[in-house]
Amino acid sequence: MKKKERSGIINPIFTCQPAGAQYVSIGVEDCIGIVHGGQGCVMFVRLLFAQHFKENFLLASSSLHEDTAVLGATHRIEEAVDVLLMRYPEVKVVPIISTCSTEIIGDDVEGVIRKLENGLLKDKYADREVHLISISTPSFKGSMVSGYDIAVRDFVREFATKKEPNEKINLITGWVNPGDVTALKHLLNEMDVDANVLFETESFDSPLMPNGDAVSYGGTTIKDLESTGDAIGTLVLNRYEGKLAADFLETEFEIPSIIGPTPIGIRNTDAFLNNLKKMTGKPIPESLVRERGVAIDALTDLVHMFFADKKVAIFGNPDLVIGLAEFCIDLEMKPVLLLLGDDNVNYSKDPRIKEFEEKVEFDMEIIENADLWDLEERIKNGDVELDLIIGHSKGRFISIDNDIPMLRVGFPVYDRAGYYRHPIVGYSGATWLAEEMANVLFTDMEYKKNKEWILNVW
Amino acid sequence: MPYHTFKCSKCIPERTKHAVIKGHGEDLTSCLPLGYLNTIPGSISERGCAFCGAKHVIGTPMKDVIHLCHGPVGCTYDTWQTKRYISDNDNFQFKYTFATDMKEKHIVFGSEKLLKESITEAFKAFPEINRMAIYQTCASALIGDDMDAVAQEVMNEMPDVDIFVCNSPGFAGPSQSGGHHKINIAWVNQKVGTVEPKITSDYVINYVGEYNIQGDQEVMTDYFKRMGIQVLSTFTGNGSYDDLRSMHKADLNVLECARSAEYICNELRERYGTPRMDIDGFGFKPLSESLLKVGLFFGLEEKAQKIIDEETARWKPELDWYARRLKGVKVCLWPGGSKLWHWANVIHEEMGVEVVSLYTKFGHQGDMEKGIARCGEGALAIDDPNELEGIEAMMELQPDVIFTGVRPGEVAKKLRVQYLNAHAYHNGPYKGYEGWVRFARDIYNAVYSPIHQLSGFDISKDEIDMDNGFVTKNIISDAEIDREASIANNEREYTGKYDCVTHLREKTY
């Protein structure tokens, strides 16, 4: 495990913390976040979501301008909350998401929330359920990944209460796509597990209806969030995207939690089902044995013929990169370069990283606080020879300019159609990933006329 | 001209003077919507920030430059790869983006050292590029780093490199427009006059306010070159850093987007006496008039006329084919700034569409004045629209198509309104004669899409069509068209290629 050797960044892998908090915010029903900062901090993040999902999501800005940047801008929050509540009568939850500028000028968001609760909300919105949540996500700390983690915790902390045990598990999915949520719900259903799937993105993939009334919104309700305090356990799929909330629930309500593994690939999906079994006592049914068999069947056709010893570089969200690397190894591939795009000090202590360090017998480089130049420079210098790149669309030109095939996975993916719809988790996700990797390699063989005739009789 | 009050905005009285409906015979100047005022917090406005106005809109289209943001990584990441300003050097400017990645310790202890390291690293990574623009962000502005001093220090140590400093933090103004202004002035103050160019023609222009969206600049430059004109620099699309340092040596500044770049033209006029000529590359008539105007300035009218005649003969029959089929199509013209008035009249005149509404996110009152003057009666004009107002307008006006950005395009989609990208275009370029046909073609393809027709169909209520295995666009568009007249008039569909720009790069003049 190494650190990037430069101070600055050339082609970043991640955006900053407020984007992660915004992603959590759009997963909640009747919720519009106010990003307290300059307008670009919202406008571009909404564009990013629109690029990835081909849908529109609502987020507001406190519209910091010059005067307020100097003199303090809490009054802009007050005005924003009022304007938002007046015009969106269905809104009940308003997270106030801080940015670099408003953290630097030291705006007291919690103070202004108390003021609003005792003033505006009592005077003007007395009959209305409104929750204001302070989410502190200065852009100069962490990344969009830690922003997600923080916001999940802050939402849960705001609402979680202990009433009656509900026999449900809390499932914190992390930064996943609608297709992943569908796949996870399917597994839960087969296991007959009643789960509270949090920050639920399945409904992001909304229809275009004849009467024109459809919108995209997240599926997690206030009730869902409240009931997290009554669960029998919390399952967090991604260590860096939900663990803070699980820790909170454990400390505050003594709800046991299991962190990971990210159910990417067969082995990790097995572990996920085993965790469900452990937590609920429910057995793994025959239907899933069969479903697993379908996936294994598909992989068997590909692995030793096409994947064996192929060298792969992977970049993106840490849990995603680690999960994909583990799966690639099971597919007989060699993930020789993993790029984790922020400076989270916990990566070096991650047991999965330790396992790579101890057990992998080929050269594998793991770079933390990495940028995409760490990848491209190694390719250009000949320090690494790659058969495949796996990562999100911001790295597309590395693939295009260096003639290395690339499978788009992660966030954002805007240069391939409909990828948010396909799962990468569960057995169906394992199948999709492997088959898409194969198809990407096949297309590359044909494009380069590199033994393309092999596919004549496959 | 009555102010228009949106139902959704009745509760925010500040909005009442930001929308008007153009009435019959009314005096435009006496009743314009307010413009370029502070945004109402929480209104879900579509505006961006002054950082993106400087860096993303005007800075980054410069092609042979390392563009480095001094701040946390988000400002860089978020504005990276979200536009289509191409260049003839393999798009270096949007393939690579650079940031200092400011962290908490830098906020506390300052980050000038970090900036310097990042600058030298970037030059080291790309030894063939020795020009750089560094951009301030909210964070670096608030902690007060002296970026000019750092840039000067590096330039002293590395004599081959040149660095431009743009101090335009996100909060500097109500919208991206504040950043346009700041970077215009910064460039003329810091860089113009620092390079003496090679003059190769008696007719020398700077092409200003042109960002080479999908190749616009290359199409227009082709016309200028065919007239024998030397395009000394382009501010900034496909523009070269050192060329832009020699802007003072042009005979004329030819200005396209006055919203984003009139400032530098006005400064150049004041400081170097270079006249400013506003032109318009969109639409056959405005473009022809523009070429003639430039021709007249240099005594090159005949050459201009030759181009106009050739291009019109080649492309007019194709424009006419679409215009016949676009007559009466209702359009919401909802771009960022100057296309509001570049397009308002000409799309009606030349394509027959009806502009039912126009808006501007970051335009000033002057833009609205021009836009309203050029659109038809009954049009709804909105300054700094917000999400709910846009939806309300679309529900009321029922446009066939809306010209706007990617994300608002998704809002329109759900309301069953077709969308064309007004900023980055669908299949541009849209400037030039061929480009204008491509625009008409894109509108046609949107409006007469069979899938769009199917989207309004409710299979649970409506009678399902069992007679057609498919429907072509032409069947839909030509239902009430006089096809015979269209054929007699020699009209035809677009015959150009998918890429109509790259071949221009091989051309000699």
Image (cartoon, grey):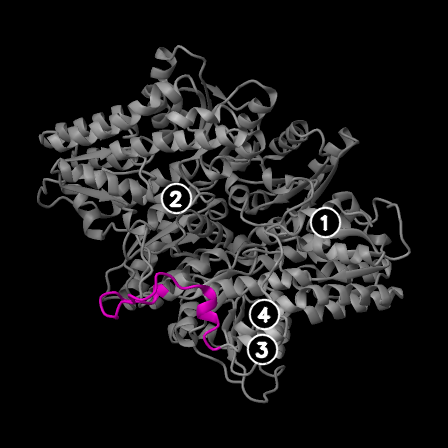
Q: Are marks 1 and 3 in contact (CB under 8 Å)?
A: no
Where does residue A444 sit, x and y in percent of width and height?
49, 30
Residue under circle 1? Answer: B504
Residue drawn 56% across and 18% down? A383
Q: Measure how far apart labels 1 and 3 are at the Cα level.
A: 35 Å
Is circle 1 on the same chain as circle 3?
yes
Give a yes or no on whether discs 3 and 4 share a subunit: yes
- Classed neighbour count for the residue bearing mark 4: other residues with Cα under 10 Å, few (<14), some (14–19), many (≥20): many
Residue mark closest to the camera, 2 vs 3: 3
For the residue pair A215 and B369, the one nearer the viewer reads as A215
- Mark 1: few/some/many CA within 10 Å (<14, 14-19, 20+): some
Are discs 1 and 2 located on one and the same chain? no
Q: Which residue is drawn at 27% across and 64% down?
A: A122
For numbered disc 3, what is the local secondary structure? helix
Residue placed furthest toward the bottom: B25
- Circle 2: element type: loop
C-alpha separation, residue under disc 2 versus residue under disc 4: 57 Å
Q: Distance between the residues labelled 2 and 3?
A: 66 Å
Identify which residue, B71 or B387, lies in the foreground.
B387
Q: Which amino acid does label 2 sit on?
A: Ser
- The stretch of residues the image draws in magenta is B454-480
Q: Mark 1 lies on which chain?
A: B
Q: Disc 1, disc 2: CB below 8 Å?
A: no
Query: What's under tag 1, amino acid-wise?
Result: Leu
Q: Nearer the viewer, residue A385 or B480?
A: B480
Question: What is the chain identity of the residue bearing mark 2?
Answer: A
Q: Disc 2 marks which residue?
A: A136
Q: Mark 3 points at which residue?
A: B485
Position of the N terminus of chain A, as image quadrant, is top left
Q: Is mark 1 on a helix, strand or loop?
A: helix
Circle on res. B321: 4
